[in-house]
Amino acid sequence: MSSWLLVHPPLLGPAVLQPLAAELRQRGSSVAVPDLRAAVETAPGWPQRWAAAAAAAGPAEVVVGFSGAGIVLPAVAAAVGARRVVWLDAVLPTGTWPDDVRELTAPLVRDGRIADWTAWWGPDAMTGLLPDERLRAAVLAEGHELPADFYDVAVPVPDRWPDDDVRYVHLSPAYGEEAAAARARGWPVVGDGAGEHLDVANEPARVADLIG
């Protein structure tokens, strides 16, 4: 039985990954999905706190980072002693956030915090993004606000991390540049990128197949 660690993005909580975790468990794997939101209450030092909190879930053979979790995934993989690392429609570990992330979030800052991601798209958008009522309620309940300077913090990439067996899973058009950059690194890329970012929650069986 393989052991998996699923890492949610800083903008969301672990609920978005629970359908995938359930699918992997049904296939016979042991899966941990820790709640890492406390690590991003303040910006300075968050990557170190994030990796330490993820490692507290215990060792894992496979680490999967979804969306924004990808930027800190090497540190998490090193901390848990993973042998395989999967970027799931995720930001690549370049040390700094893409400029378009800062441009997107700058207008969303109020009182020193970035607005809850679930509120970015309008009052009814989440119904379309997450049609399952229970899942949507769980994701909304975990909504939180990142500090305004969150994306200014550099995210160091360890000199040594388990990069012998990596994969990029491309779900949505929004991550086309990241998928192309992964190919340029020589990483295997699976998925056609024609779906939706939240297929991770809405189509867990298909995503589990892509993860391999």
Image (cartoon, helix red, strand yellow):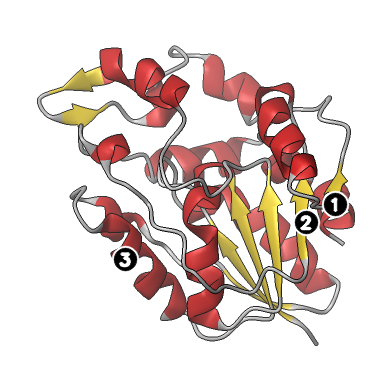
Local secondary structure at mark 3: helix
Does residue 29 sit above or below 148 in this rendering? below
Kindly check if marks 2 and 1 are in contact, taking CB atoms under 8 A apart as contact. Answer: yes
Q: Nearer the viewer, residue 135 or 65?
A: 65
Q: Nearer the viewer, residue 68 or 4?
A: 68
Local secondary structure at mark 2: strand
Q: Is residue 79 visible?
A: yes
**Residue 107: x percent and y percent?**
28, 12
* Residue of label 3: 48
Between discs 3 and 1, the one toward the N terminus: 3
- The C terminus sits in image quarter: bottom right
Q: Is residue 15 left or right of residue 23?
A: left
* Residue of label 2: 167
**Residue 118: x percent and y percent?**
43, 28
- The N terminus sits in image quarter: bottom right
* Residue of label 1: 188
Q: Is residue 53 left or right of residue 147?
A: right
